[in-house]
Amino acid sequence: MKSVFGVLGAGHLAGFICQGLKQSAWQGRVLISPHKPNAALSFASRFGADIAESNQYLVDACDVVLVSVRPDQYGVALENLDWPDTTILLSAMAGVAISEIQTVVGKKQIVRAMPISSASIGKSPTPIFPAQPLVQSLLSWIGSTIEMRSEEEFEIATVNAAVYGWHFALIKELVDANIAAGLPEKEAKEIVIDTLSAAAAVAKSSGQSLEQRLVSLATPGGITAVGLLELQKKSAVTGWTDAFNKVLKRLQK
């Protein structure tokens, strides 16, 4: 095993992944594309990576090559490359199907994955399709992998990369509400963030269904029920489903 991870498209997502690998006990080597010299130099300096002689050298030298260019740029990025059968193309391009990538590189080993920025602290829940042991082993250094049974399932799971960002909007809204009501900023951030973390931990570990848990918390006349009713009146709960479906439709185009 070469233990060489290639990066074609050294943007934010690649940076989050390499930051997570750098701070973990992963012992491999990172090799990046020389396509944009200044960006490559900066990326290499930040993450201790080496710059490949060429993109062809990159795909020849690596076990796995992350392709994280803009979805409308993959054709240009991958054209004229002789992709080895032994090198896995790891696509993090939202909405680009395996069949589309194959029109450029041929019937090669292609795996789709969608890490999020929490990869930088080793906490990314990453959906992948199809399951591939080498890719799963690599991604285990930046969080967990969740195997999807089909590309259709993967597309649905990809929406949660957007949902992740919405959580920050929710956190900000609640922090601002606490501050406006009179709580100091430090304490407002701590209570809001730790409460959200506690809810996630209970949802993951509890033997109850989410519906049962909600019923047990939202007792009639209680403060949880009063607030939940207000959210429902303003479609603040179902609005998340509407947003989820809008993103999914965009990915499925």
Image (spheres, rainbow, N blue to C red):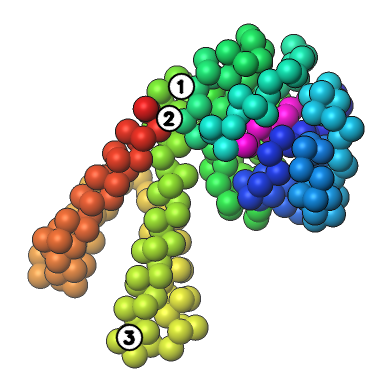
- Asked if 229 appears above or below 93 in the picture, the reply is below
Q: Amino acid at mark 3?
A: Ala
Query: Which of pointers 2 and 3 lies earlier in the amino acid sequence?
Result: 2
* Figure quadrant of the C terminus: top left
Residue at left offset 37%, top offset 78% = 176
Nearer-the-camera pick, 79 or 42: 79
**Disc 2: which residue:** 155
| Residue 39 at least partly seen | yes
Near mark 1 (Cα within 10 A), the count class, few <14, some 14-19 or many ≥20, is some
**Disc 3: which residue:** 180
- Asked if 148 appears above or below 206 in the picture, the reply is above
Nearer-the-camera pick, 158 or 82: 82
Is residue 245 shown in magenta? no
Q: Which mark is residue 108?
A: none
Is mark 2 in CB contact (under 8 Å) with mark 3?
A: no
Q: Amino acid at mark 1?
A: Glu
On the picture, is 210 further left or further right than 26? Answer: left
Residue at left offset 77%, top offset 14% = 82
Percent coordinates x, y for residue 89 in the rendering: 67, 24
Percent coordinates x, y for residue 123 in the rendering: 59, 50
Is mark 2 in CB contact (under 8 Å) with mark 1?
A: yes
Element at label 2: helix
The stretch of residues the image draws in magenta is 63-69
Near mark 3 (Cα within 10 A), the count class, few <14, some 14-19 or many ≥20, is few
Q: Amino acid at mark 2?
A: Glu
Residue at left offset 62%, top offset 37% = 69
Distance between the Cα atoms at labels 2 and 3? 39 Å
